[in-house]
Amino acid sequence: MTRPVPDFAAPDPAAPLIVDAHLDLAWSSLANGRDLARPVAEIRRAERRTRDNVMLTLPDLARGNIALVFGTLYAQPASLSFAQDLVSAHPGGYTTPAEARAQATAQLEQYLRWEDGGHLRLIRHLQDLDDHLRRWPQDAVPGVVLTIEGADPILAPDEFDWWWRQGVRSVGLAWTGTRYAGGTGDPRGLTLPGRELLAAMREPGALHDASHLAEEAFWEALDLTAPGALIASHSNARALLTSAGRADLPPDRHLSDDMIRAIGSRGGVIGLNLMNSFLDADWTLQGRAVPVRVRDQVARHWAYVSELVGWHSVGIGSDLDAGAGREESPEELDDAADWPRLAGAVPEEHREAVLGGNWLRVLRANLPRT
């Protein structure tokens, strides 16, 4: 029997190609019971939500010229700690490494089902990336690089090889603290297993994602990460988020100026998180005291980081649909089709690099050739 071909919108050949380095696609699908092979509009009509309205689905990515994304394997812990007021809680959070692994493998299986159904292409090797970029202008099938957010699903450092063989090409050791490192709201350094995991990641060439990593662990990890392999997929400038002193937004969730400089000096890229709470600390879902706009807060964060490390070190890591959605996003962004509006926050001569080229450079330097 012939498999039906998914219906994708045609990309705009005149617009810059976009790479979004942080989307919780499988988590969004499984935690919310969403079929992300359907269009955004169809899911919104069915769900009729007043918050957390879906922003992105697989067929809609091409409407925003989003050719490639980093898709997470994110195991949600039983305690949400710092994020309790930022995201909607879901039952069934993990309390053991085995439970974390079960969540992540269920999400891995979801990506594989999507790949088998022709809804996406998993990017495992450099040749996959080159092939995808040749085909995408014609077929609009999105490419996905798998990344683990919070390393507790990796039962032991020597198990990383199994995850690598499944296609994982990037790992963030922490979300909140994990067995491997301190994380947001948990100021600790690397554990011995954390050091061993970084060594296991370095051998095949995996990216090390420092988003959520406690600053103590960040500095310990620098010399353990291969040159050019350190990134922060979805983090903003801490210096711009200190005004409100909110208990639900620990200062260590985002990057200090010195951390930003360290990533940039090592050839890495920092993806801007587009959640309103992470763009303006005076914004909350309950109060919405300030409007959040691409031309204001988004432009301000990108300009600040680029002043420290240059426009070649910034990109997109939206994190939208990670327990948030339309109501928690900048005013100009209604759904995936609006991602090209982000270009207005970047000087024209740097738009192609910031919207996608910088992430492609990092992938070309780190993906295995075979």
Image: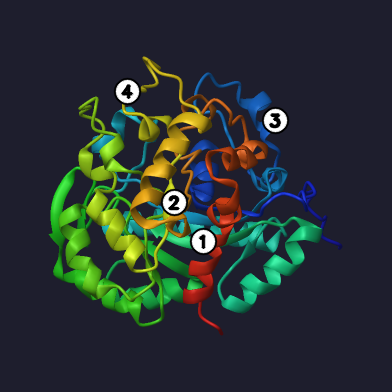
**Label located before the other in sequence (3 or 2):** 3
Residue at image coords 24%, 27%: 243
Residue at image coords 58%, 35%: 55
CB atoms of marks 4 and 2 within 8 Å: no
**Label located before the other in sequence (4 or 3):** 3
In the drawing, does residue 22 fall left or right of residue 257?
right
Q: CA distance from mark 4 to mark 3?
A: 30 Å
Q: CA distance from mark 4 to mark 2?
A: 21 Å
CB atoms of marks 4 and 3 within 8 Å: no
Residue denoted by label 1: 359
**Label located before the other in sequence (4 or 1):** 4
Residue denoted by label 2: 271
Q: CA distance from mark 1 to mark 2?
A: 9 Å
* Three-letter amino acid code at the position of disc 4: Asp
State the residue lying farthest toward the bottom. 370
Residue denoted by label 4: 282
In the drawing, does residue 313 fall left or right of residue 117?
left
Residue at image coords 61%, 55%: 352
Query: Label 3's element?
Result: helix
Name the image quarter holding residue 193.
bottom left
Percent across and percent down for residue 337 are: 67, 38
Residue denoted by label 3: 41
CB atoms of marks 1 and 2 within 8 Å: yes
